[in-house]
């Protein structure tokens, strides 16, 4: 059956060697509809981001861009504003008919840690063609905070699919009629639209802005950092927020969304014509997100303003969720039987902050 591969199919691909690694793949890497990827032991500092290009290998292009090589064993700091390339532990030999897409994990995106998948022969980031056979790399660019990383850390994840899986707007309408996908009225136009919440039900805290000069964040230290050392709180009582060019914001959607067990979703940016900003999205929403008792969880928005200051208004549409059908229901759902940091979330920073 066409669709996004669930955890059971991912385990089959691992058992068959289609997905393999230099050290055994851990059970906790397998998510309901994706596989977490692990950093290897080496990083290259690059003078520029690059793609290998059709018919070329990443390893053959490194000499053109490498500044220096560093080991990650024992921990190494990736500095804000610099570009790094890290070979991943996993390697792929995908069967024909299976393609893949990668995205940053939620905590990676909330730290403004730009992480993209790079492949041999690649002409775009985060996309693998059907039958890809070769190594995979993570390009990492810390944009707001310097970070301490080690081998085995999981910054991005891979979702595999067979055939066409995306729901049309008509199919999305039918699904919403059977199982409500969003609180309030559903805006369905090339996916499920969502807007920004700048009028919270209680208080006037609407988000956070990354502070420009902060310390290093050790990604393994959960709940270890005071938010005020890295973030400025944003308060408003008039439903408006003026975004500063170059600044990074954590905001939250007005709507609570749900992903039924037989579906997965991916957050996509809204049209650039609506304003001088972009929702820098982490991406994947697993089956079961916001589903069940007290249904619905709000989406955290990672927003960066571009060339000009921009006035963001409460209820302004800023992004959309593209729903895909699963090839089969996962054995485990998000928030049910697995450690899901953001189930039932509202406005929430990355898990490294207390």
Image (cartoon, rainbow, N blue to C red):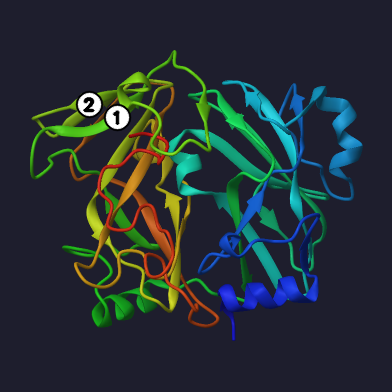
Number of marks in the image?
Answer: 2
Q: Is residue 256 left or right of residue 31?
A: left
Query: Image quadrant for the C terminus?
Result: top left
Q: In this view, does 187 lie to the left or right of 349?
A: left
- At x 43% / y 74%, what residue is drawn? 263
- At x 77% / y 56%, what residue is drawn? 23
Query: Image quadrant for the N terminus?
Result: bottom right
- At x 9% / y 35%, what residue is drawn? 203
Q: Name the residue under label 1.
A: 208
Q: Name the residue under label 2.
A: 234
- Where disc 2 sits, the SS reads strand
Q: Is residue 58 left or right of residue 328?
A: right
Q: Quadrant of residue 251?
A: top left
Which class describes the residues within 10 Å of circle 2: few (<14), some (14-19), or many (20+)? some
Cβ–Cβ under 8 Å for marks 2 and 1: yes
In the image, which disc is placed on residue 319? Answer: none
Q: Nearer the viewer, residue 184 or 189?
A: 184
| C-alpha separation, residue under disc 2 versus residue under disc 1 | 5 Å
Q: Which residue lies furthest to the top in this view?
A: 213
**Eyeballing the image, is 263 above or below 243?**
below
What percent of the width, then of the height, locates residue 29? Answer: 59, 60
- At x 78% / y 74%, what residue is drawn? 95
Which class describes the residues within 10 Å of circle 1: few (<14), some (14-19), or many (20+)? many
User: Can residue 150 be spotted in the picture?
Assistant: yes
Q: Nearer the viewer, residue 66 or 280?
A: 66
Q: Quadrant of residue 65?
A: top right
**Eyeballing the image, is 97 above or below 86?**
below
């Amino acid at each position: 059956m066409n669709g996004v591969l669930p955890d059971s199919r991912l385990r089959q691909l691992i058992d068959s060697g289609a997905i393999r690694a230099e050290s055994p793949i851990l059970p906790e890497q397998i998510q309901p509809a994706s596989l977490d990827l692990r950093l290897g032991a080496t990083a290259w500092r690059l003078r520029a981001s690059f793609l290998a290009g059709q018919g070329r290998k990443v390893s053959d292009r490194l000499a053109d861009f490498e500044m220096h090589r560093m080991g990650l064993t024992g921990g190494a700091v990736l500095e804000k504003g610099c570009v790094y390339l890290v070979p991943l532990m996993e390697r792929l030999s995908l069967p024909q008919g299976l393609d893949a897409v990668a995205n940053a994990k939620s905590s990676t995106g909330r730290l403004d840690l730009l992480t993209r998948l790079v492949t041999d022969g690649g002409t775009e980031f985060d996309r693998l063609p059907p039958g890809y056979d070769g190594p995979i790399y993570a390009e990492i660019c810390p944009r707001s905070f310097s970070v301490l990383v080690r081998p085995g850390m999981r910054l991005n994840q891979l979702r595999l699919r067979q055939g066409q899986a995306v729901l049309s707007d008509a199919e999305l309408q039918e699904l919403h009629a059977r199982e409500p996908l969003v609180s309030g009225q559903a805006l369905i136009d090339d996916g499920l639209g969502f807007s920004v919440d700048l009028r919270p039900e209680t208080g006037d805290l609407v988000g956070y802005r990354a502070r420009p000069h902060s310390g290093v964040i050790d990604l393994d230290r959960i709940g270890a950092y005071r938010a005020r050392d890295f973030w400025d709180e944003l308060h408003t009582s008039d439903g408006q927020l003026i975004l500063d060019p170059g600044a990074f914001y954590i905001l939250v959607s007005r709507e609570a969304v749900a992903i039924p067990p037989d579906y997965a979703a991916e957050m996509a940016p809204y049209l650039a014509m609506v304003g001088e900003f972009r929702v820098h999205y982490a991406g994947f929403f697993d089956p079961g997100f916001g589903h069940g008792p007290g249904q619905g969880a709000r989406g955290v928005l990672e927003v960066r303003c571009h060339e000009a200051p921009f006035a963001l208004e409460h209820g302004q549409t800023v992004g959309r969720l593209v729903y895909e059908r699963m090839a089969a229901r996962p054995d485990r759902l998000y928030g049910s039987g697995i450690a899901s940091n953001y189930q039932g979330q509202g406005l929430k920073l990355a898990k490294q902050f207390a």
